[in-house]
Amino acid sequence: MEGWRQKNRPECLEKRFEFESYEKTRDFLDVLGAFCERVNRFPDISFGKTYANITIRPSDDNEKEEISKVDHEFATQLDSLIQ
């Protein structure tokens, strides 16, 4: 989970992914989109020419609305999308 920051208000995990070119950013966003569809979990995404900011909020099944092990595992899965 290198590079992820946990914030408390509101509870979330955030990371900025940086890329060499617009093409690589688009490739990442395409892979990210397909992965999120497959697992049915959708982080907040903002992006520019050579970066993508990802924000993970507590999973929908988390009654306390706190970042949990499931959220950290999702972040680790997103890290693995970078090839």
Image: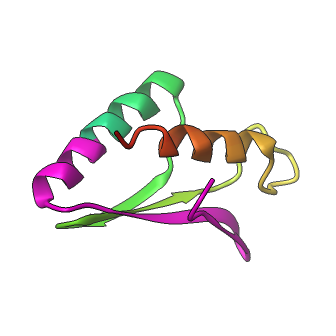
Q: At x 81% / y 57%, what residue is drawn? A: 66
Residue 39 lies, in percent from the top left, at 52, 26
Q: At x 63% / y 62%, what residue is drawn? A: 13
Please tell me which residue lies in front, 4 or 14: 4
Q: Which residues are magenta?
A: 1-29
Q: Is 35 situated above or below 73?
A: above
Residue 41 lies, in percent from the top left, at 54, 36
Q: At x 38% / y 43%, what residue is drawn? A: 82
Please tell me which residue lies in front, 65 or 26: 26
User: Quadrant of residue 62 in the image?
Assistant: top right
Counting every numbered tag in the picture gives: 0
Check residue 20 for magenta coloring: yes
Q: Quadrant of the C terminus?
A: top left
Please tell me which residue lies in front, 71 or 22: 22
Check residue 24 for magenta coloring: yes
User: Quadrant of residue 22 in the image?
Assistant: bottom left
Q: Is residue 59 visible?
A: no
Name the outermost residue toward the bottom. 9
